Image (cartoon, rainbow, N blue to C red):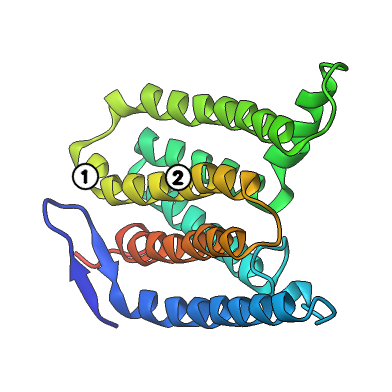
Amino acid sequence: MRYRKLDRGRGTFDLSLFAIIGSLQIFLISIHIWMGLATRQNPAHVWPDMLNIARDYSLGELLNYALWVVIIACVFVAWRRARDPLLLATAFVYLLAFVDDAFQLHERSAYVVMALDFHLSYSAMIFTLAELVVWAFLGLIFFGVIVLTWPNATAETRAKLAPQAILFGVLVFLAVGIDVIHQLAEKRTLTAGIIGVIEDGGEMLVLTAMLAHALPTFGRDTS
């Protein structure tokens, strides 16, 4: 396996692992694009949900769930070894993000938010605003547990988690920011399709990058 040591004690990145899983993901993304273009040309074309990376429990999403589980396990193992509270907080944040991804937490909660005001009728904009309310609540939880544990974390742990924080930030941007743009785009258009690929394909590759850093840095000691 090819490893790259990151500077300033920020851990290790497994280049081989990223290349292997990333290649599989690019293959799935390519099939998704081909299926999308075929369906655009012929609406009667059958596009199996398993090959649509935008669908929950598609092959792409199932791979995402597996990546989440391994990433969470790596950070949790590191906490068991070092007992640094920031590692436990990170594992909790990742677990909550995984539950949201796998069980459509923000989508389901958005309907609850909408139900709190009976004057609201369903529309893409109202649903998106309801989702933003849920995301803001989840963001407060993420921010809160990190802030509470940050002062008691070691400098080594903070340094090693820095790449994870950056990648997770990119993931949130894709899952929230790009998702909002995608929802507001006109449905079944080429523009909406491109935005969807950026959102879902980007999330897949970022998760792989998170794993490629977490596994050698937290799951096993390569130092």
| x, y percent for residue 14 | 30, 72
Which residue is rendered at x = 69% and y = 34% of the image? 125
Camera-nearest residue between 72 and 114: 114
Q: How many marks?
A: 2
Q: Residue furthest right?
A: 118
Which residue is rendered at x = 69% and y = 82% of the image? 38
Above or below 98: residue 117: above
Q: Hey, which quadrant is residue 193 in on the image? A: bottom right
Camera-nearest residue between 103 and 47: 47
Above or below 38: residue 103: above
Label 2: how many residues lie within 10 Å, few (<14), some (14-19) or many (20+)? some
* Mark 1 element type: helix
Kind of residue indicated by mark 2: Phe
Q: CA distance from mark 2 to mark 1?
A: 22 Å
Q: Is residue 3 left or right of residue 25?
A: left
| x, y percent for residue 173 | 45, 45
Q: Is residue 22 left or right of residue 136?
A: left
Q: Is residue 164 left or right of residue 43?
A: left
For label 1, the residue is 159
Which residue is rendered at x = 32% and y = 47% of the image? 166
For label 2, the residue is 173
Kind of residue indicated by mark 1: Ala
* Mark 2 element type: helix
Which residue is rendered at x = 63% and y = 44% of the image? 184
Of label 2 and label 1, which has the lower sequence position? 1
| x, y percent for residue 42 | 77, 81
The quarter of the picture where the N terminus appears is bottom left
